[in-house]
């Protein structure tokens, strides 16, 4: 069976997903971008194709090894994409956002799509029904918000996310949790409402590891898929091969 590995190097984690004949079979994290970590993955799955989306300065040897052991593609604005990018300086568009746009076009062609990516940052990515990635917005993600409260105050602690929180916090931890998590949900709902004032009919796709949790806190109807970026990467890999 044809095996493709999709690598997603974000600001926080180095992740990958394994596809066999269009179906996602496994996912995991790399400890680092060294050859030993990659060697283990390549020996385990023996991929015919690989693709990398990276928003960090990773090791050049990582790409070299992938190119030696597979049909490798590095995602960039120069890749063949199933959509156009009529925006200023398309070379500045993050590879992760290109992958999310590709997933929207793959699964909801001919429709307006707003893809909300939950990661180190929240990205809002709008793709028109004419398959044009028009741009969107970027705001701080959950860990960034939690860390900033600790970094820029004298006494607020750095807390871990807890999804069992009240609307009205009763101590420092629950006040921060309610403010950050519920605040993010309301922000996303507000952005969806703002897009609704301009575009009468569009899909909302929510992705990222916490997509399922946030979907329960939002009033707008959305499609939540934590693996959307991998599916977009796979579609681009096929498109370029």
Image: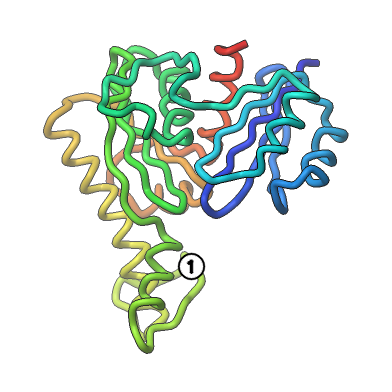
The front one of 153 and 159 is 153
Give the camera-side residue of 185 and 57: 57
Q: Position of residue 55 (x, y in %)?
A: 50, 42
The total number of labels drawn is 1
Residue 52 sits above or below residue 9 on the image: above
Residue 97: percent from left, percent from top: 42, 34
> Compared with residue 11, is residue 234 higher up or lower down, i.e. above or below?
above
Q: Nearer the viewer, residue 186 or 132?
A: 132
Which image quarter: residue 206?
A: top left
Q: Which residue is mark 1?
A: 161
Residue in the image at 29% along x and 16% along y: 129
Question: Which residue is pictured at 25% across the width and 27% down the height?
Answer: 88
* Image-quadrant location for residue 148: bottom left
Q: Is residue 17 left or right of residue 174?
A: right
Q: Which residue ends up furthest to the left in the rendered image?
A: 197
Q: Which residue is at a point 40% across and 78% down the rendered structure image?
A: 150
Which residue occupies 46% across, 19% down?
78
Classify 10 Å Cα crowding around label 1: few (below 14), some (14-19), many (20 and above).
some
Colour scheme in use:
rainbow
Quarter of the rendering occupied by the C terminus: top right
For this orientation, the residue located farthest to the right is 43
Q: Is residue 120 above or below residue 156?
A: above
Q: Is residue 137 left or right of residue 106?
A: left
Tell me residue 145's x, y (percent): 37, 65
Q: Quadrant of residue 128?
A: top left
Q: Is residue 42 left or right of residue 190?
A: right
Q: In terms of secondary structure, where does tag 1 sit?
A: loop
In the rendering, at what x and y percent does residue 45 appear? Answer: 82, 30
Quadrant showing the N terminus: top right
Find the residue positioned furthest to the bottom.
Answer: 155
């Amino acid at each position: 069976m044809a095996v493709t590995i999709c690598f997603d190097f974000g600001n926080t984690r180095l992740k990958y997903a394994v596809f066999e004949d269009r179906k996602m079979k496994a996912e995991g994290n790399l400890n680092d971008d060294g050859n030993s970590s990659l060697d283990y993955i390549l020996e385990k799955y023996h991929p015919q194709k690989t693709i990398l989306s990276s928003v960090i300065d990773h090791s050049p040897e990582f790409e070299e090894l992938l190119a030696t052991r597979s049909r490798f593609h590095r995602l960039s604005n120069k890749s063949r994409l199933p959509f156009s990018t009529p925006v200023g300086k398309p070379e500045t568009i993050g590879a992760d956002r290109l992958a999310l746009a590709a997933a929207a076009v793959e699964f909801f062609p001919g429709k307006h799509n707003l893809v909300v990516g939950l990661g180190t940052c929240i990205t809002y990515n709008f793709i028109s029904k004419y398959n044009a990635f028009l741009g969107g917005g970027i705001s701080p993600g959950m860990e960034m918000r939690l860390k900033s409260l600790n970094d820029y105050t004298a006494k607020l602690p750095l807390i871990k996310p807890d999804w069992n929180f009240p609307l009205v916090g009763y101590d420092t931890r629950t006040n921060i949790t309610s403010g950050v998590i519920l605040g993010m949900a309301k922000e996303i709902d507000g952005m969806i409402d703002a897009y609704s004032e301009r575009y009468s009919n569009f899909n909302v796709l929510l992705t990222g590891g916490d997509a399922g949790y946030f979907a329960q806190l939002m009033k707008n109807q959305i499609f939540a898929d934590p693996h959307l970026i991998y599916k977009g990467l796979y579609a681009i890999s096929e498109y370029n091969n």
